[in-house]
Image: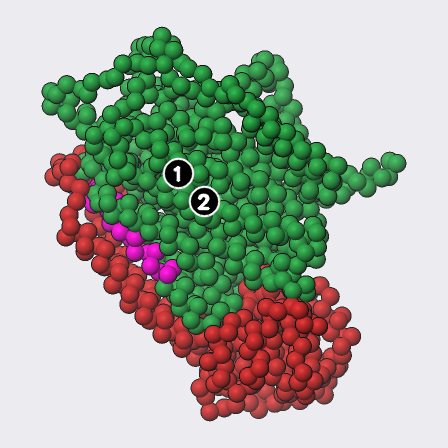
Amino acid sequence: MMKGLRRLTAMMSLLAMTILMTGCGDKLIVLNPKGEIGKHQLDLIIISTVLCLVVIVPVLILTFYIVWKYRKEKKAKYDPNWEHSTKLETIWWSIPIVIIAILAVITVQYSYKLEPSKPLEHEAEPIVIQVTSLDWKWLFQYPDQGIATVNYIQFPDNVPIQFELTSDAPMNSFWIPQLGGQIYTMSGMAMKLHLIANEPGSYLGMGANFSGREFGKMQFTAKATSQEEFDTWVQSVKDSSPALTKEGYEQLAIPGVSEVETFSSIPTGLFQEIVTKYGGHNHPSSEGGSNNNEHGSHSNSDKAADSDKAPVIEKEDHSSTNHEGHTK
Amino acid sequence: MLDKIKDFASDFFVTGDPLIYGADVSIGLTIIAVVFALTYFKKWTWLWRDWLTTVDHKKIGIMYVIASLLMLFRGGVDALLMRTQLAIPDSEFLSPEHYNQIFTTHGVIMILFMAMPLMFGLFNLVVPLQLGARDVAFPFLNSLSFWLFFFGAMLFNVSFVIGGSPDAGWLSYPPLSGISHSPGVGQDFYIWGIQISGIGSLMTGINFIVTILKMRAPGMKLMKMPMFSWSVLSSCLTIILAFPILTVTLALLFIDRYLGAHFFTLDGGGNPMMYINLIWMWGHPEVYIVVLPAFGIFSEIAATFAKKKLFGYKSMVFALMSISLLSFFTWAHHFFTMGSGANVNAFFAVTTMIIAIPTGVKVFNWLFTMYRGRLSFPTPMLWMIGFIPCFVVGGMTGVLLSVAPADFQFHNSYFLIAHFHQVLIGGVAFGYFAGLYYWWPKVFGFKLNEKIGKWAFWTWNIGFYVCFMPQYFLGLMGMTRRVSSYGWDKGWYELNLTSTIGGFLMGIGFLFQVWQILHSIKFMEKDTTGDPWDGRTLEWTIPSPAPLYNFATLPQVTEKDDFWEEKQRIAQGHAPKPRPQLEPIHMPKNSGIPFVMSAFWFVAGFGFVFDWLWMAIPGLIGVAVCMLVHSFRYKTDYYISVDEIKRTEAAARRVV
């Protein structure tokens, strides 16, 4: 039986490798990032996998070896009272401790480096896209361009994108795997996510967190193009699409799925209104123009330090407003 | 009038799905068959006297096991329905609503109504015997715990034919689970089903802590206690710290829904984030609660079937205790991507990783228990060995998930699904199966068929890898959890189909187990020795199945693995330890109050679910009356006479 087991294991791993090598490679989009953040995350995935394998592989080999060697039929050494060895125990308390210590240091470093609310260092000015998760569709507003889209975004490549995210429905999670990890969209607050696409292409985007009946349909295309193509697209949206009105937004927010839509203009302060609608924060300067950078706030106050570096956030926004429902 | 009744019935009963009509019919037929059989064979008094009112921990344990295996069937059917839906793209087998209900009930049932009661069943069957005790510390409470679990689980289960199932996920985050987004009764079934059974779980935790601390046989110091009992102690300590959080959280959610409060709704000043924090403060320790006893089971099995002392006993104890402590410092890793900021994420990433250290040490200790042993491979040992690679790989992917910045790519994806099924099936299910196979002869007095058991083991194991390995890759392909269908363009088809095939293989493995039990009942191999595996701990010193009072005389313990050492001494020609004189044994009397009181809880819960105060209030009054009646019960115990003990022992030894 053991022989059979070993053959089976060998065959299965061979099979698994074949499946992996053929065809699936480019479908594993998380392992095939096209943006800086995603690339760092891939590095981290690889480092942590290798570190874990350093322990796992010997353990698996040892398991098969011990089970094989000390099976009853074979007369290997039998030592029924051997129950303690300080040397051995020290070794295997220390191996995991060392591995986890290394991994912990790396994790902490990357946690700060890849903190999603931290702006990317780049010579280009970031493009701002305001994301709202609705039941069951995504509304994207471009405050600087004055346009809006549903279930589709386009942006120039090699330009940092500053996503500002909120929700006007149960929370969801905004995820474009090939550009980088996800962040939740939650009502009453504006989260931030900075991503960049290093090359043009159409990337899969989705809502990753369950938010009710049709949440599976909350997928969108995120298209990175050259700056010129992007400008042309913005112009065509402006020329050929209807305007998004307040009433139009109310219609859009009614639960249901939606096709891709584009709008040539957006109502003033819509995003801010969505953020503060849940009693979050009634900010005096929220009447500002299209380039309004008010945010309900982040969920925690320890990001104040980060936010200082972010020019788009005003100081008084840090008061953790989403936790205070008493205004209004 | 007729229209009114029709209206009511169409709300009250779930309609519109042929699968559910099928379930209605089969539930009806099963109930009729059971009632008929009980009446025809005149078994009603037997059922009431011997089972429904019993306070014997062994019988309560058996009822836990039966109930949890039924729940495993229900949760498994849910799983197969989901896998069938996902086998091909754009499938219309299940509607999105129905799919959401199924994954919600699958999660709740598997964790709370399958894993927990199977664990409590094993606690009940084994712990007093292992400690050399005659019962648990509070037998009446123990019976109440079981019936609360049972009626809570039933309340949750009826939701799928009456009123409608919850569909907001197994942890029911608001606002999705709030009244605005889930106006139906499903969420209320969820709240009351879990609440009622959760009270039972908390009481079991208290009961077993006291049992372990106060009821050990003379001479059994804590550091001589069998490892399974240690794991139960660590698990129960975690229970009594974690379950009150769940009780409060669900109570607040209920107040939000029922009285219109705003603990978890933004528009009234509450915060859904508070719910998410609270529920995971219970939820993460919960997975350690269920896995810790499995570690204990593996320790017992490794030592028994290697015929060798457990390696690194003190390390094991330390590891168990540190895991149960650390489990309370990991909850925020469930929402690394909710913008907690780098400080919080870094802290919880590191505390999560640290758990891998004691867990890793335990694996080494099991391996070195087997090292220089003399291994045999009956079914319990097979599950133990099958567990190691499965759990090690699952543990590794857990460490990968704990790396917060990388988790931004894994979170909510099938990678996560594969990980937690690997640790929960590989750790918890395999562990409890191993324990069930191991202690089965002690409980029922016969061994389970080994050949069918091996078939079950291999089908389960191969099915497991075929089902869940592809899901890691699906996660890396961007497939998110809880999607009810996906398009052909995604390229997820082949792996999903493979995964579905694996799921059905596991289903076949389960059928093998059912067949194995039925076959073994018919052609049982009687355990006449009381010690079929050449065991090491006290439960193997008494006949199988154990007599009502467990031990005729309480054993005197001098060593770890006392029974094994005793056997060694006798083999070397020493005289066995002298036995004290028989004395009358003090036993608790049966009581119908736990059953009746839990039934009243069910009535009250059902009333609250449907907002029928005319039903809920009498239900609560019934509960109060039961408490009152019990507090005036003075004759709660009796003695078994020496003559009767002699007769029982003689009868048990006759088969020896």
Chain containing mark 2: B
The answer to whether residue A175 is visible is no
Q: Is residue B168 left or right of residue B412?
A: right
Residue beneath label 1, please? B209
Task: Indicate whether A306 appears above or below B356.
Answer: below
Main secondary structure type of the part rendered in magenta? helix
Q: Is residue B355 magenta?
A: yes
**Could you tell me residue B141's position as x and y percent?**
49, 31
Q: Which residue does the image show at 57% across and 43% down from the upper left?
A: B195
**Chain under disc 1:** B
A27 over B202 or under it: above or below: below
Question: In the figure, B439 relative to B316: above or below?
Answer: above
Residue corresponding to mark 2: B240
Q: Which residues are magenta?
A: B351-372
Question: What residue sits 57% from the left and 91% below the top?
Answer: A228
| Colour that chain B carries in the picture | green
SS under mark 2? helix
Above or below, B155 relative to A148: above
Disc 2 and disc 1 in contact, CB within 8 angstroms:
yes
Residue B176 is labelled as none
Q: Does the stretch in magenta take in B218?
A: no
Question: Where residue B524 sits in the image (x, y, percent)?
Answer: 38, 20
The residue under label 2 is which amino acid type? Ile
In depth, the one of B320 and A225 nearer the eye is B320
Location of residue B527 in the rendering, given as x and y in whole percent from the top left corner: 33, 20
Along the viewing direction, whichever of A131 and B99 lies nearer the viewer: A131
Q: In the figure, residue B398 lies in which quadrant? A: bottom left
Q: CA distance from mark 2 to mark 1?
A: 9 Å
Where is residue A261? Give x, y as percent. Answer: 69, 75
The chain letter of the red chain reads A
